[in-house]
C-alpha cells in the first residue's frame, strides 16, 4: 500500500482515538483540577459504561439504536450515581488527602473490576452499532460509526464547556477549583460540589465507554489502557487545564496513530509513557500551559 | 552501639521464631512461608522509601522486575551459577534504581507517584518489546541445571523444600538486620528528617536530594534483590512480575503491616498472602476483598497494624 | 582588635515580578557582633536574610561569606560553611522527639556526609549539650510537636546551636513569646554570641535594644540607616519611616 | 457501595457473603498444623487450577464445566480403581505467581494425586518447574510447544491437545494447495505467536509458498485498524491467530478494512473462542476458514461420542450453553480437559494406582501409552501419544464459515501432525 492511504487511515484512526481520549481525559482532568484527586479508578468507570451499554443492547428488544440510546442515558446516570456514592463513602471520609485518595481509588479499581467480573462474566461482549455502514475508499473500508463517535465526542466536550462557563454549577466548580477556602467562606457547599465533580468526571468516562463499545468489545479488564493514556494526555496537557487536555488528546491520539505507522506500537507506547514522566520532571506545568500560572 | 535495643531483640526473636516454624508448620505452610519471606523482602524494600523516607512510589515492580530479569537472564543465557546470578540481579537493580531515582526525585508528592508509575509502565512494556530476549509475556523457564549450586562445599538443591525455606529465611534475616542498622542509625534519622520536614532538613545543611536518592537506591536495590531471589528460587521469569499489580502488592503489604516499622512488611505480607490464599479457594472475588481492605486500612488505620500499635503503646517499634 | 568582616553583600537585589523586595543592598557584618535588622512591614527583611541563607536566589549582586562568594551556592552548602538560619514560623520535626530534632542538626556538623564521620554517641552528646544550652535538657524525650510554643522556639535555637555556626540568623525569634520567655531568650542569645555572630530580625524594640551591638534599618528593600542603637533611635529618617507606617 | 453495585444480582452477593463467612472457618481448619493432613487412600484427588479470573477467565469457566461433567461420568462408572475421584478447583488468576502458589497448595496441603487443566502458556511456564520439584504429575491442557521442545521436566504431560507446532504444520499443505501460496501472518507478539510464525513460515516454504508479510501485534493492543495497511495487496491468504479479550475487535476490524475484495482468510479459532459467530459484525467471515481441534458446530456426520460429550457438558449443537444460546463455549480447547481426565484414569488403572506413593508408576504407565481410541472418553478423535515427548497428536479440522456456521471441509490425518522428537523425557530421572 502507498504511503498516502496509509497516512489517511492512521489519521482517521488517530482522530477516533483522540475523541474518545478527550472524553476520558477530560473527566480525569476535571476531577484533578477541582478536587486535586488523582482517580486511579477512572478507567473502571469507562469499563462500566461499556458493560452497561452491552447490557442495554442485550436486554432491550428492538433495533440496536434503541439499546444504544438507552445505554447512552443509563450508563452515565448509573456510573455517575456510583461515583457520587463512592466520593461520599470513601474519598470524603479521608479528607481528600492526595496520597490517601490514590490508595483508595486503587481499592475502588479492584472492587469495580472484580464486581464487573462477577456481574457480567469474563467474556468479551460485542455490541451492535446503532447503524452499520462501511465507507469505502479506493484502498480500504472504514466504519461510518467511528466517525460518528468523533462528532458525538465534540458535541459532549462543547456541552461540558458550556456547563463550566455558563451555568451556575460550572461557576461553583470553578470557584471551588480556584480556592477551596474562599469558596467555603462564600457559603459554597464544597462537599456537594466535590461529589458532583467526581460524578461528572465518571460520567464522561462512562459515555466514552458507551461510544467505544460498538468498535471494541466490553470486557471487565478494558479499563487499564484508557486510564494510562488519559494520564498521558492530562499530564502532557497540564494537570487540570481543560484546553490543554483537549490539545493533548488530539496530539497524542494523532501521534499514536502516526507513530505506529513507522514504529512498533509497543515502542510507541514506551516512548509516550517516558514522555509523560519526562514532562512531569522537567516541565511539570504541562506542554501547553503558559508558565507562571499555578498548574 | 545498638541504638534501639528492644527493637533489635525483637528482630532477633522474630528470626528465631521463623526458623523454628519450619518444624511446627505443615508442609504447605512452610512452602507458603518461603514465598512470604521473599515477598516480604520486596515489601521491606518498598517500606524503605515509603515508610522511612515518606515517598510513595507506584512503580516498584520495575525494581523487582529488574532484579528478576537480570538474575534470570544471566542464568538463562550465560549459565552463570546461582550466587553469581543473584549478585548480578542485585547490582543491576542498584544501578537501575540509582538512575531512575536521579530523575524521579526531581518531583515529589503526586507527581512522584505518577512519574514512578510511568517509568514502571515503560519498563513493563520494554519486557514485552524485547520479547525475543525476555520471553515476553510467556516468560522463560530456567533450565534444570540452574536449580542447584554449591556453597562452601555444600551442594544446595533449590528443589528441596527445606533448602528453599532456609535460604529465603537467611536472606530475609540478612536484609532485616541490614534494614535495622540503616533505619535506626544516622541514615535512618536523615530519612525521617526528609519525611517529616524536607525544607527544614535542607536548612540544617543536608542535600536532601542526595538523602532521598540514597533511600531510593537502597529501596530499589532491596526490591530488586527480592526479585532476583524469586526468579532463582522459582526458576521462572516473566513480564507479569514487572506489571502494575506487583507495585500495588508492595504498597498493600507495607500499608497493612505498618509503613515505617521494620517488621510491618513481614506482617502485612503474611496477613495478605494467607488471606488471599484462603479466600481464592472460596470465591473468585478475592481481589475485591483486597480492594475493600485497601480502602478500610486507608480510612481507619493509615498507619497499618504495627504503626497503630506503635502509636498507642510501643513507641520504640520503628 | 582588627575588625574582621564575616559577611558582606554587594548590590544585592531580589525582584518578584514588578516588586523590588531587596534593592541594591550593600551590607557588612563584623565577626562577633549581634546585629539587628529592623524595618516596617514589607521592608524586605525576611527576603534579605533568605538571600543570605540561600533559601531564594538573588536577582543580582553578591553575597560574600568569610571571604568566599557564596551567591550561587544552594542553602544547604551555605549551612555547611557556617550560616545557620532559624525560621520565622516555627519549623521543627513535630513528630520526632526533642533529642532527635537536635541530633539531626548535630549530625549535619559531625557527620556531614552519608558515609564516615562521627559516631552516634558523639552526635547524641553534642545534641544534649545544645539542648542544655537553651534550657531544654529536661525535655529530651518529649515529642517536639507537643511542646509549648516558647519551648519550640528554644528548640529552633538549639538546632541552630548544634550546627555550631559562625553566623546564626534568627528571623523574628521572640514573636509570640511571653515576657518571661523573652527575658530567658535574650540570655540564650547572649550566650550564643560568645561563639557565633548573630543576625536577628526583630520587631520588639526592647529586645533589639537589649541585644544589638548595631542596628540596620531597611525600608522598601533599601538600606535606610545603620548604626549603634543610640544613633538609630535618634535618626530622623528612621522615625519618619516608622511613623509613616507604624510597625 | 458494593451493595448498590450488586443490587441487581442477589445470587452473586449471597455467594460472596457465604464465601466471606465461611472464610473464617477455613482459616481455622486443620491442614495448617504439621501432622494434620488428608487421609491417603480413601479417594483419588485431582487438583484443578483453572483460570477463573484474569485474561483466561473465558476459557477457565468452560474448562471447569467440562471437568465437572467428566468427573460425574467417571464417578458414575465407579471412579478409578474403585476409589471415588474428587476434583479440587483453585483460581490461579491467569497469573504465573499465583499459578505456582496454587501448585504448592495442591502438592503440600491438599496432597493431590495429580494436577491438570492449565491453559495459558505463561502460567504453564512458571508452574511446570515447580511441579517437577514438588514431584507432582502435571497435565497440561495448553497448546504450547514448550513441553515437547524439552524445556520442562518428566512430570509434565499433554495427553490430549495437540501442540501448536503440529497444528500449524498440518494446516500448511492444505492452505498452500487450496487457498494460495503468498501468506500474510498476523499473530500476537509473544512466544505463542512466535510458535505460529516460525512453524508456519517453515511449513509454507516447504510447500513452495512464501510469507509475504508478518505482523506481530502486542498483547496490550485494543484497536487494530492501523495494522491493516501492512497487509500487502498481493496476499493470497491472511493467516491470523489472536488471543485475549480484544480478539473480536481484531476480526471485526479486519473485515471492515478488507471489504469484499478480500483475499482468502485462514484463522485459528483461538481468535473467536467463546464468541458468538452469528452477529452482524462478523458477517464478513462468511466463506473464510478456521482451524478447529474439535468442531464447534455439530456436523452432519456427528459422532456418537461428540453427541454424548455435548450433552454431558451442557452444550448445544452450535457450541453454546444449553441454558443460554449467547453463552458460547471454548469448544475447540475444552475437550482437552475431558480427555485428559480419562487419560489420567487410564494410566492410573494401568498402574493399579491407589495413592500418592504410586505416582511414578502412574507416570511410567502414561509414558507407555501409545495412543487413545475415539469414543466417549476421547470424543475429539483417535490420537497418538508420544511417551518420550509427553505430547499427544490428533486429527485437526479445517472448517469454513457457511451460513454463519463452521462446517468442516478437511480433516487432517494424524500423520500430518507428526514431527521428529525434540526431546526424550524418559531419559530424565523422576
Image (spheres, coloured by chain):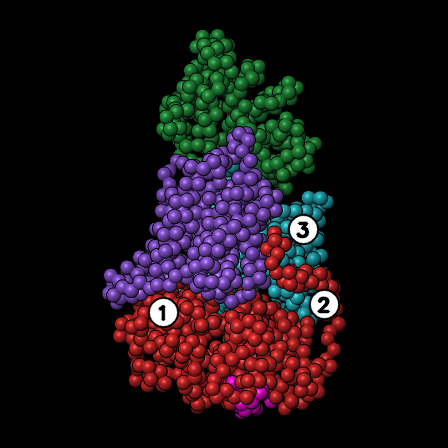
Chain colours: A purple, B cyan, C green, D red
Mark 2 neighbour class, 10 Å CA radius: few under 14, some 14 to 19, many 20 or more: some
Reading the image, the residue beneath label 1 is D255
Residue B310 is tagged as: none
Reading the image, the residue beneath label 3 is B305
Q: Nearer the viewer, mark 1 or mark 2?
A: 1
Q: Tell which subunit mark 2 falls on.
A: D
Q: Please determine if labels 3 and 2 lie on a single subunit.
A: no
Q: Earlier in the sequence, mark 1 or mark 2?
A: 2
Viewer can see residue B98: no
Measure the C-alpha gap from mark 3 to mark 2: 23 Å
Give me the residue at 42% from left, 66% from top.
Answer: D249
Measure the C-alpha gap from mark 1 to mark 2: 55 Å
Decide whether residue D213 is among the magenta residues.
Answer: no
Residue D128, located in which quarter of the rendered image?
Answer: bottom right
* Mark 3: secondary structure: helix
From this viewpoint, which residue is outermost toward the front?
Answer: A62
Q: Residue D424, image x and y in percent? A: 51, 86
Give me the residue at 52% from left, 46% from top.
Answer: A199
Magenta residues, start to end: D363-380
Mark 3 vs 2: CB contact within 8 A? no
Mark 1 neighbour class, 10 Å CA radius: few under 14, some 14 to 19, many 20 or more: many
Give me the residue at 67% from left, 83% from top.
Answer: D75
In the image: residue B242, left or right of residue D313: left
Q: Tell which subunit mark 3 falls on.
A: B
Residue D429, located in which quarter of the rendered image?
Answer: bottom right
Q: Nearer the viewer, mark 3 or mark 1?
A: 1
Q: From the viewer's perspective, is residue C169 above or below residue D62?
A: above
Decide whether residue D375 is among the magenta residues.
Answer: yes
Quadrant containing the C terminus of chain D is bottom right
Amino acid at each position: 500500500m502507498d504511503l498516502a492511504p496509509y497516512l489517511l487511515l492512521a489519521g482517521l484512526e488517530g482522530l477516533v482515538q483522540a475523541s474518545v481520549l478527550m472524553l476520558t481525559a477530560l473527566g480525569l482532568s476535571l476531577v484533578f483540577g477541582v478536587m486535586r484527586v488523582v482517580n486511579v479508578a477512572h478507567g473502571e468507570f469507562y469499563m462500566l459504561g461499556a458493560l452497561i451499554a452491552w447490557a442495554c443492547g442485550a436486554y432491550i428488544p428492538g433495533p440496536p439504536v434503541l439499546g444504544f440510546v438507552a445505554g447512552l442515558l443509563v450508563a452515565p446516570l448509573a456510573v455517575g450515581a456510583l461515583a457520587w456514592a463512592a466520593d461520599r463513602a470513601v474519598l470524603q471520609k479521608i479528607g481528600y488527602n492526595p496520597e490517601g485518595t490514590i490508595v483508595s481509588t486503587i481499592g475502588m479499581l479492584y472492587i469495580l473490576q472484580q464486581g464487573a467480573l462477577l456481574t457480567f462474566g469474563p467474556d468479551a461482549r460485542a455490541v451492535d452499532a446503532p447503524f452499520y455502514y462501511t465507507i469505502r475508499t479506493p484502498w480500504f473500508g472504514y466504519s461510518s460509526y467511528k466517525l460518528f463517535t468523533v462528532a458525538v465526542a465534540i458535541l459532549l466536550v462543547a456541552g461540558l464547556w458550556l456547563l463550566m462557563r455558563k451555568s451556575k454549577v460550572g461557576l461553583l466548580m470553578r470557584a471551588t477549583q480556584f480556592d477551596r477556602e474562599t469558596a467555603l467562606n462564600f457559603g459554597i457547599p464544597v462537599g456537594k460540589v466535590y461529589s458532583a465533580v467526581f460524578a461528572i468526571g465518571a460520567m464522561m468516562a462512562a459515555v466514552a465507554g458507551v461510544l467505544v463499545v460498538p468498535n471494541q468489545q466490553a470486557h471487565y479488564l478494558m479499563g487499564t489502557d484508557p486510564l494510562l493514556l488519559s494520564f498521558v494526555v492530562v499530564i502532557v496537557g497540564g494537570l487540570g487545564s481543560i484546553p490543554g487536555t483537549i490539545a493533548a488528546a488530539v496530539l497524542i491520539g494523532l501521534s499514536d496513530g502516526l507513530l505506529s505507522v513507522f514504529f512498533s506500537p509497543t515502542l510507541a507506547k514506551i516512548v509516550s509513557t517516558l514522555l509523560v514522566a519526562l514532562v512531569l520532571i522537567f516541565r511539570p506545568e504541562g506542554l501547553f500551559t503558559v508558565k507562571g500560572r499555578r498548574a | 552501639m545498638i541504638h534501639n535495643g528492644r527493637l533489635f531483640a525483637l528482630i532477633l526473636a522474630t528470626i528465631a521464631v521463623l526458623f523454628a516454624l519450619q518444624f511446627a508448620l505443615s508442609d504447605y505452610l512452610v512452602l507458603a512461608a518461603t514465598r512470604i519471606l521473599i515477598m516480604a523482602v520486596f515489601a521491606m524494600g518498598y517500606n524503605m522509601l515509603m515508610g522511612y523516607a515518606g515517598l510513595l512510589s507506584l512503580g516498584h515492580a520495575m525494581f523487582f522486575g529488574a532484579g528478576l530479569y537480570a538474575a534470570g537472564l544471566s542464568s538463562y543465557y550465560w549459565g552463570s551459577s546461582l550466587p553469581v546470578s543473584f549478585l548480578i540481579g542485585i547490582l543491576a537493580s542498584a544501578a537501575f534504581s540509582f538512575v531512575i531515582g536521579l530523575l524521579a526525585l526531581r518531583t515529589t508528592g503526586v507527581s512522584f507517584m505518577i512519574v514512578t508509575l510511568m517509568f514502571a509502565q515503560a519498563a513493563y512494556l520494554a519486557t514485552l518489546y524485547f520479547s525475543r530476549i525476555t520471553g515476553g509475556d510467556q516468560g522463560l523457564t530456567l533450565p534444570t541445571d540452574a536449580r542447584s549450586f554449591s556453597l562452601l562445599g555444600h551442594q544446595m538443591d533449590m528443589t528441596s523444600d527445606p533448602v528453599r525455606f532456609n535460604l529465603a529465611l537467611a536472606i530475609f534475616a540478612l536484609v532485616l538486620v541490614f534494614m535495622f542498622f540503616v533505619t535506626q542509625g544516622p541514615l535512618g534519622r536523615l530519612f525521617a528528617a526528609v519525611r517529616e520536614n524536607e525544607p527544614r532538613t535542607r536548612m540544617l545543611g543536608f542535600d536532601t536530594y542526595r538523602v532521598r536518592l540514597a533511600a531510593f537506591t537502597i529501596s530499589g536495590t532491596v526490591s530488586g534483590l527480592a526479585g532476583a531471589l524469586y526468579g532463582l528460587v522459582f526458576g521462572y521469569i516473566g513480564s507479569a512480575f514487572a506489571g502494575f499489580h506487583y507495585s500495588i502488592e508492595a504498597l498493600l503489604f507495607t500499608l497493612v503491616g505498618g509503613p515505617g516499622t521494620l517488621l510491618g512488611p513481614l506482617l502485612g505480607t503474611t496477613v495478605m498472602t494467607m488471606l488471599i490464599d484462603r479466600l481464592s479457594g472460596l470465591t473468585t472475588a478475592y481481589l475485591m476483598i483486597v480492594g475493600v481492605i485497601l480502602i478500610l486500612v486507608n480510612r481507619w488505620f493509615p498507619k497499618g497494624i504495627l504503626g497503630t500499635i506503635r502509636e498507642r503503646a510501643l513507641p520504640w517499634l520503628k | 582588635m582588627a575588625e574582621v568582616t564575616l559577611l558582606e553583600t554587594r548590590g544585592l537585589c531580589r525582584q518578584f515580578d514588578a516588586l523590588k523586595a531587596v534593592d541594591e543592598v550593600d551590607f557588612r557584618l563584623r565577626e562577633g557582633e549581634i546585629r539587628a535588622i529592623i524595618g516596617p512591614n514589607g521592608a524586605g527583611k525576611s527576603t534579605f536574610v533568605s538571600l543570605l541563607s540561600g533559601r531564594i536566589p538573588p536577582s543580582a549582586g553578591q553575597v560574600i561569606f568569610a571571604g568566599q562568594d557564596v551567591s550561587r551556592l544552594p542553602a544547604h552548602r551555605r549551612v555547611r560553611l557556617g550560616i545557620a538560619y532559624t525560621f520565622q514560623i516555627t519549623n521543627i520535626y513535630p513528630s520526632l522527639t526533642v533529642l532527635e530534632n537536635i541530633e539531626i542538626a548535630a549530625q549535619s556538623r559531625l557527620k556531614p556526609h552519608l558515609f564516615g564521620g562521627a559516631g552516634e554517641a558523639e552526635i547524641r552528646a553534642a545534641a544534649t549539650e545544645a539542648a542544655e544550652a537553651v534550657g531544654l535538657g529536661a525535655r529530651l524525650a518529649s515529642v517536639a510537636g507537643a511542646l509549648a510554643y516558647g519551648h519550640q522556639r528554644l528548640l529552633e535555637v538549639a538546632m541552630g546551636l548544634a550546627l555550631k555556626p559562625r553566623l546564626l540568623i534568627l528571623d523574628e525569634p521572640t514573636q509570640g513569646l511571653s515576657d518571661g520567655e523573652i527575658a530567658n531568650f535574650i540570655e540564650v542569645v547572649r550566650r550564643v554570641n560568645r561563639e557565633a555572630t548573630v543576625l536577628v530580625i526583630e520587631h520588639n524594640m526592647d529586645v533589639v535594644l537589649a541585644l544589638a551591638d548595631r542596628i540596620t534599618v531597611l525600608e522598601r528593600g533599601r538600606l535606610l540607616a545603620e548604626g549603634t542603637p543610640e544613633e538609630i533611635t535618634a535618626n530622623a529618617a528612621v522615625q519618619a519611616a516608622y511613623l509613616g507606617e507604624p510597625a | 457501595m458494593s451493595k448498590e453495585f450488586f443490587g441487581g444480582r442477589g445470587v452473586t452477593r449471597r455467594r460472596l457473603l457465604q464465601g466471606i463467612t465461611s472464610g473464617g472457618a477455613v482459616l481455622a481448619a486443620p491442614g495448617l498444623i504439621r501432622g494434620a493432613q488428608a487421609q491417603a487412600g480413601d479417594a483419588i484427588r485431582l487438583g484443578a487450577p483453572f483460570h477463573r479470573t484474569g485474561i483466561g477467565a473465558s476459557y477457565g469457566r468452560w474448562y471447569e464445566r467440562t471437568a465437572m461433567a467428566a468427573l460425574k461420568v467417571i464417578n458414575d462408572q465407579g471412579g478409578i480403581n474403585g476409589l471415588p475421584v474428587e476434583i479440587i478447583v483453585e483460581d490461579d488468576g491467569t497469573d504465573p505467581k499465583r499459578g505456582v502458589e496454587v501448585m504448592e497448595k495442591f502438592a503440600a496441603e491438599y496432597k493431590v494425586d495429580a494436577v491438570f487443566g492449565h491453559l495459558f502458556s505463561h502460567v504453564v511456564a512458571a508452574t511446570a518447574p515447580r511441579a517437577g520439584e514438588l514431584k507432582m504429575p502435571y497435565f497440561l491442557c495448553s497448546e504450547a510447544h514448550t513441553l515437547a521442545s524439552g524445556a520442562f521436566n518428566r512430570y509434565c504431560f499433554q495427553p490430549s491437545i495437540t501442540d501448536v507446532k503440529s497444528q500449524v504444520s498440518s494446516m500448511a499443505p492444505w492452505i498452500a494447495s487450496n487457498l494460495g501460496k503468498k501468506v500474510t501472518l498476523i499473530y500476537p507478539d509473544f512466544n505463542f505467536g512466535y510458535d505460529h510464525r516460525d512453524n508456519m513460515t517453515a511449513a509454507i516454504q516447504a510447500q513452495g509458498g512464501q510469507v509475504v508479510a508478518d505482523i506481530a501485534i502486542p498483547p496490550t493492543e485494543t484497536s487494530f485498524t492501523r495494522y491493516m495497511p501492512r497487509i500487502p495487496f498481493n496476499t493470497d491468504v491472511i493467516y491470523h491467530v489472536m488471543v485475549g479479550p480484544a480478539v473480536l475487535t481484531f476480526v471485526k476490524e479486519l473485515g471492515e478494512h478488507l471489504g469484499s475484495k478480500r483475499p482468502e482468510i485462514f484463522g485459528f479459532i483461538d481468535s473467536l473462542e467463546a464468541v458468538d459467530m452469528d452477529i452482524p459484525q462478523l458477517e464478513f467471515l462468511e466463506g473464510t476458514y478456521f482451524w478447529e481441534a474439535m468442531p464447534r458446530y455439530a456436523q452432519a456426520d456427528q459422532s456418537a461420542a461428540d453427541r454424548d460429550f455435548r450433552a454431558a457438558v451442557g452444550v448445544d449443537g452450535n457450541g453454546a450453553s444449553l441454558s443460554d444460546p449467547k453463552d458460547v463455549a471454548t469448544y475447540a480447547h475444552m475437550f482437552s480437559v475431558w480427555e485428559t481426565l480419562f487419560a489420567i484414569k487410564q494410566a492410573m488403572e494401568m498402574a493399579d494406582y491407589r495413592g500418592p506413593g504410586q505416582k511414578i508408576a502412574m507416570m511410567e504407565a502414561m509414558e507407555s501409552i501409545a495412543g487413545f481410541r475415539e469414543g466417549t472418553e476421547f470424543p475429539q478423535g483417535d490420537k497418538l501419544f508420544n511417551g518420550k515427548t509427553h505430547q499427544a497428536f490428533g486429527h485437526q479440522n479445517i472448517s469454513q464459515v457457511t451460513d454463519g456456521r463452521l462446517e468442516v471441509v478437511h480433516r487432517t490425518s494424524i500423520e500430518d501432525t507428526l514431527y521428529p522428537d525434540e526431546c526424550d523425557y524418559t531419559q530424565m530421572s523422576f
